Amino acid sequence: MATLDDSRAGAAPWLLSAPALLLFLALLLVPLLLTFMLSFHVFSDIAGVQRGWTIANYLGVLSDPYYGQIFLRTAGLAFAVTILSIALGVPETLVLARMRRPWQSVCLLIVLGPLLISVVVRTLGWQILLGNNGVLNNALQSLHITDEPIRLVFTMTGTIIALTHVLVPFMVMSVWATLQKLDPQVEWAGRSLGAPPLRVFRRVLLPQIMPGVLSGSIIVFALSASAFATPALIGGRRLKVVATAAYDEFLGTLNWPLGASIAVLLLIANVAIVMGCSRLAERRYKHIFD
């Protein structure tokens, strides 16, 4: 009887999670599998998608310098956004953690509030701010800092700025969750022993918040590498990234197998980089994660 009860207790979590697991399989894994299968289909300009199977789509993407440049541009964009998110999000979170209520709650709501707004709306707002006749250029010319508008729309710089604003809240949330688990007395102990604030931050606080910084970096990198709306609106048609290139193949040339192969390669590259960074971080900061 005890064995039967134990088996039922062991099966209970699986039975309870079965509906969510089936929903996950239906909404995520099945579309990914169909996309993967579509990427091996033959495409004809006249007849469209054919029943045959081929790896020519992958070979064409991997051997074409045009797509190689797009993948490198996407990687550079993701790394730049991740670095800026760390540089802005970590100090911002540390300042928020030292605020007193109710100002802490108000400022935290201001930082995380943009997540409640559609990314398209936020990107359109940045397009207005960064335009040649936008608020930023008008202010710079009014202050006689520049004589002519600075071109920020349809450039990599403008895309990085807008995408960083979109993704910084994810870094703040990750570091904030880590800070809530820390004992503030440890930092004060370092200060009481005569260590300067910079050394206390480098030797005491930074190692403890590194798990949050690393998890936030992984989230920001993955989201920025696969971002579509912001690069499409701010970068335009000339500054293509992998997501917009796949979109163009699907809806522009109607070459669905080629678009699917680009999407699959983006997924593989994204997963490989994220898992590699996670493995290196676990080895480097194993004592912190433990």
Image (tube, grey):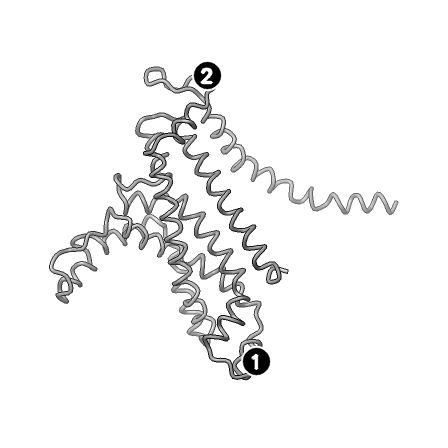
On residue 189, the disc is 1
Q: Which residue occupies the foreground of this view, 33 or 27? A: 33
Q: Is mark 2 on a helix, strand or loop?
A: strand
The residue where tag 2 is placed is: 51
Q: Which residue is drawn at 39% across and 20% down?
A: 43
Q: Is mark 1 on a helix, strand or loop?
A: helix
Q: Which residue is drawn at 46% across and 78% down?
A: 197
Measuring from the top left, give residue 179's x and y in whole percent: 52, 67
Is the residue marked by circle 2 packed among few (<14), some (14-19), or many (20+) residues within 10 Å? few
Amino acid carrying label 1: it is Ala
On residue 25, the disc is none
Measuring from the top left, give residue 34's x and y in whole percent: 50, 28
Is the residue marked by circle 1 packed among few (<14), some (14-19), or many (20+) residues within 10 Å? few
Measuring from the top left, give residue 128's x and y in whole percent: 23, 53
Label count reads 2
Amino acid carrying label 2: it is Arg
Q: Which residue occupies the foreground of this view, 138 or 4? A: 138
Q: In which quarter of the image is the C terminus?
A: bottom right
Residue that extends furthest to the right in the rendered view of this protein: 1
22 up-or-down from 99: above or below: above
Q: Which residue occupies the foreground of this view, 139 or 78? A: 78
Q: Which residue is drawn at 50% across and 75% down?
A: 200
Measuring from the top left, give residue 271's x and y in whole percent: 50, 42
70 up-or-down from 110: above or below: above
Q: Which residue occupies the foreground of this view, 252 or 263? A: 263
Q: Quadrant of the N terminus?
A: top right
112 up-or-down from 275: above or below: below
Q: Is residue 140 left or right of residue 84?
A: left
